[in-house]
Amino acid sequence: MSTDDADSLLDRFPEPDLDVEAPDAYALLAGVFTLHLGAEMSYAREPSIIWGIASMYVFATALVLIGSGVSTVDVRRWGRPLSGAAFLAIMSALGVIYLMIHGSPINTDALDFVNTAAGTLLSGQSPYIVSMHSGGEFPTPMVGGGHVNQYSYPIGSAVVAAPFVAIAEDGSRIAVLLFTFLAGVVLIGSAPHELAPLALFSLLVGDFITWGVSDLTDPLWVAPLLAAIYFWPWSRVGRDSLRWSAVLFGIAMAMKQQPWFCAPFLMLWVWHERGRWTAARYVGTVAGTFGLIHLPVFVLAPEAAVVGLLTNLYGPSGTLVHLGVGLSALTLSGAFPIAKGAHTLLMALVGIGSVVAYWTYFDRLRWLAWLAWAPLLFFNYRSLANYFIVCAPIAVMLLNGRLGRETEVSTSA
């Protein structure tokens, strides 16, 4: 191409005036994923004015987000209200979907067992001594045949679901939807404007935001974990309260086992920054919160409660089958079967190595304490996809915590 031709092209196509920066890209991604969710919602349409309005709301906010991303709208100034409006649109649509599926069977044994356990608590019994049978499509099989039929989660999920189960036969779905809403409020509400669209995007990854109507339970522990990060003293967002952070983390631990893996790393963080006595008080507050929530079941059936709490860590009689997207995928594919003992050994080695590396390189690794289950469960013989999808909103909350106030100040200066 000659120099004259190059000059001619530059005259016809001058430098673009569209300055695409990270916040614009975040808004665009959030809009695209909101479109995806709206398309999924369209498959469930019915002759209802409520459904029609919800669908319009979702697609309208998706288009606004996309328009903000590709135009010169200042996402650094309007990111939080734009993302908040889209989030409310999605939650309203999920509310409509819940009304449409209300009364239908719960399809996962995880949420079905939470629902049953909540009803058992309301009757004054311990869920850990009751045999449970899921009528859904996704029971958990065991190697020796049959399916898991015992409640094997901390009791917190059943406790928060109990008031809703008292008024609706599938009240656990309502509980998950409520905690999804709370997670979004904490995540988007605490984000700087320029990171708010990224926060919304993280809730849409893997359809996390729809888990309340998809019969998965993880928002029940993700919401209090996000709130614990909000109060974490070393976070740049939220309030500085180690006590409230410990209480909320104890609640998260009382919902599901994944946060348990974070506990030693968070204790080391507090010890490193404020000394061993403050770390001891932190551990005491977390343990006290966890114990208080479990006190009724410890009183009703202490041995059964301990067995139920630890079941998912060592497997019930008959043991669970290999299942997951981590190292267990090699066994599932038949390409390279791995014995469960090898998985346990690898988890132990990774766990010990992680603790040593965390203390040695604390300044670089400190924020990874809140995601500690991910590398460990990657090597477990059960490494389900939802174990890792939940990393998306938590990672963005951690980014908020690291950069929040600094980013807000720098963009408003």
Image (cartoon, rainbow, N blue to C red):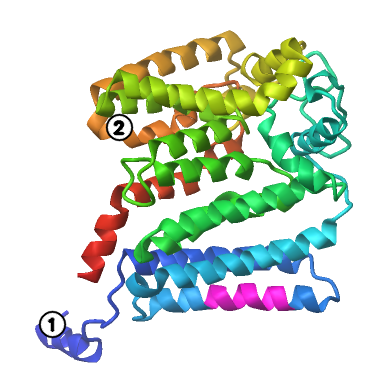
Residue 335, percent from left and from top = 59, 23
Could you tell me which secondary element the residue under label 1 belongs to?
A: loop
Q: Which residues are magenta?
A: 53-63
> What residue is rendered at 85% in x and 31% in y?
120
Residue 126, percent from left and from top = 80, 23
Q: Which residue is mark 2?
A: 365
Q: Is residue 62 magenta?
A: yes
Q: Nearer the viewer, residue 201 or 333?
A: 201
Q: Visible in this render: residue 377?
A: no
The three-letter amino acid code for the residue at tag 1 is: Ser
Q: Visible in this render: residue 332?
A: yes
Residue 214, percent from left and from top = 73, 49
Q: Is residue 71 magenta?
A: no
Q: Which residue is mark 1?
A: 2
> What residue is rendered at 78% in x and 21% in y?
128
Q: Is residue 251 left or right of residue 29?
A: right
